[in-house]
């Protein structure tokens, strides 16, 4: 044990406080009574180490706290923040400790004004210790006071470009408490430069989310779930809605068992029976109106194609029924109109059986139970152009009709 002193406390030349090369034991800097150790520069206290303090009141809320050996760097110049209250405590004019808790021991505590931040551990059980980031203390949504946020900021050299080169840097994310103090919000994006705050549990300021495993055909796939996420077009908030409701109203189609149906009375939402279905046009003129105007570079283009191939005794590719009342002037089961071409067919039938059938009929018509019955009825009118080669070849065909007693 020794004391070190120079006359008038003047240090000159090679004087120092420590142990030289011949020392064979550690250098101990100690106080024997219960006194702190202070470190000063320019005659100003910069750092201190608490003495043995087994029971100290921290504010009015936390009496009897053991602060022995805690190290403090900074001012510690106010009545409340006058000594370190965590193992490492960094202070710059801290005034209150309302956010401090007794578990803020093994870590680093920062105090500034009425606010604080703690990065360290929180013991929940004898063998369970959690890593913690905590901050305090304002929740008010007033820029002069709060809410106090936990922000993640990236910076780069000031002569470079981008928000990261600015004085405030690039904010990548922030967390804020709700004004109730009962919940908090996580925001992703530069909320500082946007001048706003997150106000949902997860608030994306810009861009979108990416779920990489969702490109896999089976991972996280669940065909039994019937809820989908939808976004409000005014503010981007995400909600869920039933999948079947989305199918009914958004597309105009509903499911009747396994059959998709639409445009009937009793439909869960429009269209109803009065409405029409258009394919290829915005204003359909019939219950089903199909229009094709662009060519697919095929030899024969079709607006519609009905194809049946079953083992039934009778296969009908397309069937037409006009079933009105007796007051109808005319009911037509099927009609064809070919126009705007050098050669036009109103109705074209082809019968071609590769099985050597007993009968192939290109077009067949039955007429029954009328005052005049025509199995096939046609009207042919030549062109009005002079010397047109088709003029002498205009024909109408009327088929054979049997009276009802002969059928």
Image (tube, helix red, strand yellow):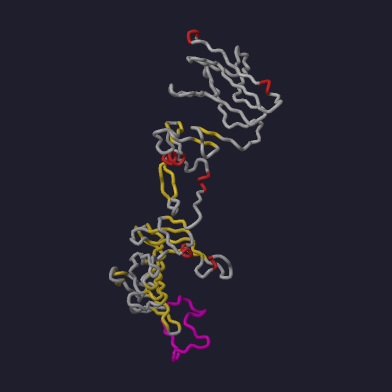
Compared with residue 222, is residue 333 higher up or lower down, i.e. above or below? above
- Relative to 368, 359 lies left or right: right
Compared with residue 172, is residue 338 higher up or lower down, i.e. above or below? above
x and y, in percent, of residue 395 in the image: 63, 19
- Relative to 217, 34 lies left or right: left
x and y, in percent, of residue 95 in the image: 35, 74
Residue ID at (54%, 16%): 374
Which one is in front, 328 or 276? 328
Q: How many marks?
A: 0
Residue extending farthest to the top is 406
Which one is in front, 395 or 263? 395
Q: Is residue 236 magenta?
A: no
Q: Main secondary structure of the magenta part?
A: loop
Compared with residue 256, is residue 401 higher up or lower down, i.e. above or below? above
Residue extending farthest to the bottom is 8
Compared with residue 264, is residue 99 higher up or lower down, i.e. above or below? below
Q: Look at the image and give the residue range highlighted in magenta.
A: 1-28
Quadrant containing the N terminus in the rendered view: bottom left
Which one is in front, 335 or 215? 335
Q: Is residue 9 magenta?
A: yes
Residue ID at (45%, 33%): 261
- Relative to 359, 226 lies left or right: left
x and y, in percent, of residue 257 in the image: 42, 31
x and y, in percent, of residue 54 in the image: 31, 71
């Amino acid at each position: 044990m020794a004391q070190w002193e120079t006359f008038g406390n003047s240090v000159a030349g090679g004087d120092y406080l420590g142990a030289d090369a011949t020392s064979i034991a550690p250098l101990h800097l100690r106080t024997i009574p219960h006194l702190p150790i202070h470190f000063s520069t320019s005659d100003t206290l910069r750092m201190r180490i608490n003495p043995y303090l087994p029971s100290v009141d921290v504010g009015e809320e936390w009496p009897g706290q053991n602060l022995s050996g805690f190290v403090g760097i900074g001012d510690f110049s106010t009545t409340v923040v006058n000594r370190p209250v965590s193992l490492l405590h960094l202070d710059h004019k801290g005034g209150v400790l309302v956010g401090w808790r007794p578990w803020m021991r093994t870590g680093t505590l920062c105090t500034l004004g009425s606010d604080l931040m703690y990065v360290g551990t929180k013991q929940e059980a004898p063998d369970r210790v959690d890593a913690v980031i905590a901050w305090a203390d304002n929740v008010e949504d007033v820029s002069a006071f709060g809410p106090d946020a936990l922000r993640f900021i990236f910076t780069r050299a000031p002569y470079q470009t981008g928000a990261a080169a600015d004085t405030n840097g690039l904010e990548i994310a922030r967390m804020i408490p709700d004004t109730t103090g009962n919940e908090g919000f996580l925001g992703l994006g530069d909320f500082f430069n946007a001048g706003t705050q997150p106000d949902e549990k997860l608030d994306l300021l810009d861009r979108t989310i990416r779920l990489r495993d969702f490109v896999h055909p089976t991972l996280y796939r669940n065909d039994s779930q019937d809820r989908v996420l939808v976004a409000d077009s005014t503010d981007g908030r995400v909600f869920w809605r039933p999948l079947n409701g989305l199918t009914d109203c958004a597309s105009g189609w509903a499911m009747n068992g396994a059959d998709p149906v639409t445009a009937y009375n009793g439909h869960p939402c429009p269209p109803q029976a009065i409405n029409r279905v258009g394919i290829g046009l915005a204003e359909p003129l019939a219950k089903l109106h199909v229009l094709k105007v662009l060519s697919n570079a095929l030899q024969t283009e079709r607006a519609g194609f009905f194809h049946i191939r079953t083992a039934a005794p009778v296969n009908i590719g397309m069937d037409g029924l006009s079933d009105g009342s007796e007051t109808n002037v005319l009911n037509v089961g099927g009609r064809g109109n070919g126009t705007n071409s050098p050669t036009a067919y109103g109705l074209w039938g082809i019968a071609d059986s590769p099985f050597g059938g007993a009968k192939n009929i290109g077009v067949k018509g039955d007429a029954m139970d009328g005052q005049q019955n025509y199995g096939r009825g046609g009207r042919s009118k030549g062109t009005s152009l002079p010397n047109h080669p088709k003029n002498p070849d205009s024909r109408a065909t009327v088929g054979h009709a049997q009276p009802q007693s002969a059928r």
